[in-house]
Image (cartoon, rainbow, N blue to C red):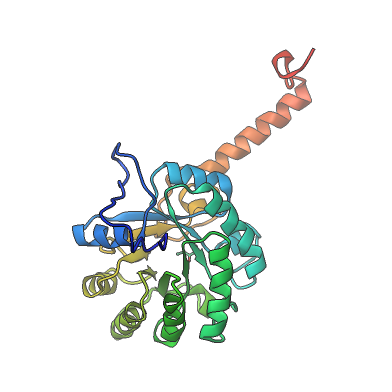
């Protein structure tokens, strides 16, 4: 059985968060079911074992090993430099720790654009690393790529609107889908759906355009800076939890200040070492 599509899965259900029922692995048919029932769901990025385990246990149904690892793990200025070799170990770590969440691996810049064959070659590597699905940026221009992966049994999440891999740092962050752009966005979304994608991320899209795409598509839309009408919402975990203490985009809501808390803990540790308060007797062996 295909673990992600659950095509032979019969009547099994996935308990969404907030319930006490035992959870099963989230599968693509659950996401379709959530859309049918009008139940919004959350996706978070994750790049390592600990966050994957915590988010999995918190009931996040989908984890994205995003190419935002470029900034958040490797400290690059944009997502462009990150490579397949750098992403694969992160996918292994997240997939190894996530017991219930569906794990989506982002195909990095340069690893799929050349041809559907290149996309398939790269996607296979991520699936072998444990991903249940892959994500790639682009609309009509990449429909053949999506089709090739889906034909090989690889579930694909699309990504439209602001697509960082096509911006090359020159376009700046601009809201997409306003005015005439709404038709283009819808045509791209339909192409990605018709090619067999199971969901599509809409990044920095006007709320009106996102609402229209969400209403017209059968597959779920996953918004980031795309308003409240999408079927699901995604945030980069380091932004939403405040590990990134720098400026974050307006669409980010911060749910914690982990960065400040870590800085406090590190400072206290250093103070204790300097003062001799650590290690104490209980931390030492006779
Ligand atoms: O790489 C990433 O984190 C993403 C999200 C912004 C959707 O693509």
Percent of width and height locating residue 258: 53, 42
Q: Residue at x 39, y 49 (%)?
A: 60
- Horizontal side of 31 relative to 48 (left or right) equals left
103, above or below 216, in the image = above
- Horizontal side of 193 relative to 46 (left or right) equals left
Q: In front here: 82 or 131?
A: 131
Looking at the image, can residue 244 be seen? no
Q: In front here: 81 or 271?
A: 81
Q: Which residue is drawn at 41% across and 63% down?
A: 2
Percent of width and height locating residue 61: 38, 52
71, above or below 212, in the image = above
Quarter of the image where the N terminus is located? bottom left
Q: Residue at x 28, y 39 (%)?
A: 19
Percent of width and height locating residue 265: 62, 33
Percent of width and height locating residue 135: 47, 69
Quarter of the image where the C terminus is located? top right
């Amino acid at each position: 059985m295909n673990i992600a599509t659950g095509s032979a899965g019969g009547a099994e259900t996935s308990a969404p968060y907030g319930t006490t029922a035992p959870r099963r692995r989230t599968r693509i048919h659950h996401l379709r079911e959530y859309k049918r029932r009008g139940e919004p769901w959350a996706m978070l990025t994750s790049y390592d074992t600990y966050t994957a385990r915590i988010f999995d246990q918190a009931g996040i149904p989908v984890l994205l090993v995003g190419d935002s690892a470029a900034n958040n793990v490797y400290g690059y200025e944009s997502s462009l430099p990150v490579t397949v070799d750098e992403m694969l170990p992160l996918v292994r770590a997240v997939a190894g720790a996530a017991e219930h969440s569906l794990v989506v691996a982002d195909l990095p810049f340069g690893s799929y654009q050349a041809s559907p064959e290149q996309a398939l070659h790269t996607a296979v590597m991520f699936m072998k690393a444990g991903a249940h699905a892959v994500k790639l940026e682009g609309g009509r221009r990449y429909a053949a790529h999506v089709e090739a992966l889906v034909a090989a049994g690889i579930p694909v999440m699309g990504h439209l609107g602001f697509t960082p891999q096509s911006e090359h740092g020159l376009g700046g962050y601009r809201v997409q889908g306003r005015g005439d752009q709404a038709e283009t966005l819808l045509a791209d979304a339909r192409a990605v759906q018709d090619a067999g994608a199971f969901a599509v991320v809409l990044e920095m899209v006007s709320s009106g355009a996102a609402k229209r795409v969400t209403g017209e598509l059968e597959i779920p839309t996953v918004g980031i800076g795309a308003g409240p009408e999408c079927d699901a919402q995604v945030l980069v975990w380091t932004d939403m939890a405040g590990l990134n203490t720098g400026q974050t985009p307006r669409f980010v809501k911060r749910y914690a200040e982990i960065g400040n808390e870590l800085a406090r803990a590190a400072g206290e540790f250093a103070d204790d070492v300097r003062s001799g308060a650590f290690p104490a007797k209980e931390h030492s062996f006779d």
